[in-house]
Amino acid sequence: MIYCKDLILEYKNKKVLQLDELSINENGIYILLGANGSGKSTFIKSLIMDSSVKRSGIININNNPLSKEVIFNDIGFMPQFLNVNFPFRAIEVVMMGHKEYGIFFDEKKIKKKALEIMESLNILHLQNRNVENLSGGERALVFLAKTLCKNTNIILLDEPDSSLDFQNKVKLFHYLEDNKSNKIIILSSHDIVSITKTDYIIKFSKSSNYKPIHKKDINKNELKDIFPDVNYDEILKDIFSVIS
């Protein structure tokens, strides 16, 4: 559960987002949908107490005030930009995501979990590859596996599909769909097509009330509030046939 009230977020001394109240209670996939600069990434960063975001207001996670301990226990996070400057193998990177990874840890247990996740994402063949030598899409899937290896009930993904080709996007959403029953999965996106793969959207626009909208209730007027210049009748007929 994620609950926010009277939340004001600033980035580089500029107010980026203000919302009165937001409750995310149901398990499933939520997409934060909005144009660039609408505050999606800033909101996600606020949920992990990123130092670049100045915050006032209330954020509760699973009925507990947001804290480093809560983040460690309850939240998995994958950033939008993946800076890689270390010569680790992919399997080692995935294992680092596990909560129990550290100086003294059960390597066999953690490696087994990491391999299971890599297999489910169809990237087991990458396990011994140096992450520095992977393509952008392969690297994104490895870091997604690292995030999932933490095994939290809340997963935050900041534009995870931005560096993925079509095939790997399919892998991503298939995995999320298969594993959403006991998790709240939040993705930020400015890709309208992503609404076909979600359970709820949360609009990030000037007139948004930031209430989750179930996929069956999405209509063109809702989307025009986010992207007013798109001709939905001509461009997105197939999307609305999926969500209607």
Image (cartoon, rainbow, N blue to C red):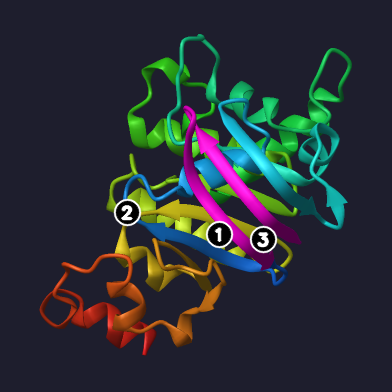
The amino acid type found where label 3 is placed reads Ile
The mark that comes first in sequence, 1 or 3, is: 1
State which quadrant residue 88 falls in.
Answer: top right
* Residue 83 showing in the rendered view: yes
Q: Nearer the viewer, residue 218 or 209?
A: 209
Vertical side of 67 occupied by 221: above or below = below
Vertical side of 23 occupied by 53: above or below = above
What residue sits right under mark 2 in the picture? 35
Residue 48: x %, y % from top left: 67, 37
Q: Main secondary structure of the magenta part?
A: strand
Q: Nearer the viewer, residue 126 or 41?
A: 41
The amino acid type found where label 1 is placed reads Leu
Vertical side of 154 occupied by 198: above or below = below
What residue sits right under mark 1 in the picture? 176
Q: Which residue is most to the bottom?
A: 244
User: Does residue 121 appear to the left or right of 107 in the view shown?
Assistant: left
State which quadrant residue 82 falls in.
Answer: top left
Q: How far apart are the two marked residues, 1 and 2, measured between alpha carbons?
A: 23 Å
Stretch of the chain drawn in magenta: 1-23
The amino acid type found where label 2 is placed reads Ala
Position of the C terminus, as image quadrant, is bottom left
What residue sits right under mark 3 in the picture? 184
Vertical side of 23 occupied by 191: above or below = above
Q: How far apart are the two marked residues, 1 and 3, measured between alpha carbons?
A: 10 Å
